[in-house]
Image: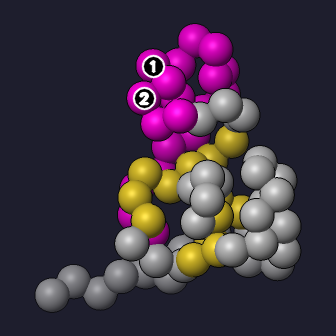
């Protein structure tokens, strides 16, 4: 079994945005619910021209988790 590294980010449970540990309110959706149990990372710069953003339902530029457990 591989040892998981501690991430410098936590993920919003509602929109999957990745934020620093000291953030209390998600800047993307306003949620206050976060988790440290997430996998994968996608960075979206241009939501209007990104197929990945369209598939994942991302509407604002930023860092997002691909999967939340």
Q: Is residue 32 visible?
A: yes
Residue beneath disc 1: 51
Q: Residues within 10 Å of mark 1 (few under 14, many from 20)?
A: few
Give the structural element (helix, strand or loop) at label 1.
helix
Give the structural element (helix, strand or loop) at label 2.
helix
In reply to whether residue 5 is colored magenta, the answer given is no
Quadrant where the N terminus is found in the figure: bottom left
**Quarter-of-image position of residue 55:** top left
Residue beneath disc 2: 55
Count of marks, rendered view: 2
- In the rendered structure, which segment of residues is drawn in magenta? 38-57
Q: Kindly indicate whether the residue at mark 1 contacts the one at mark 2 (C-beta within 8 angstroms).
A: yes
Q: Which residue corresponds to the image point at 66% horizontal and 21% vertical from the top-left?
A: 46
The label nearer to you, 2 versus 1, is: 2
Q: Which mark is residue 21?
A: none
Q: Residues within 10 Å of mark 2 (few under 14, many from 20)?
A: few
Residue furthest to the left? 1
In the rendered image, residue 29, in percent from the top left (x then y), is placed at 76, 51
In the rendered image, residue 58, in percent from the top left (x then y), is placed at 59, 35
């Amino acid at each position: 079994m591989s040892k998981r590294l501690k991430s410098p980010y936590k993920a919003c449970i509602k929109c999957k945005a990745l934020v620093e540990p000291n953030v209390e309110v998600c800047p993307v959706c306003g949620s206050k619910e976060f988790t440290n149990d997430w996998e994968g990372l996608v960075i979206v710069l241009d939501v209007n021209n990104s197929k990945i953003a369209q598939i994942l339902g991302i509407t604002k530029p930023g860092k997002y988790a691909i999967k939340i457990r």
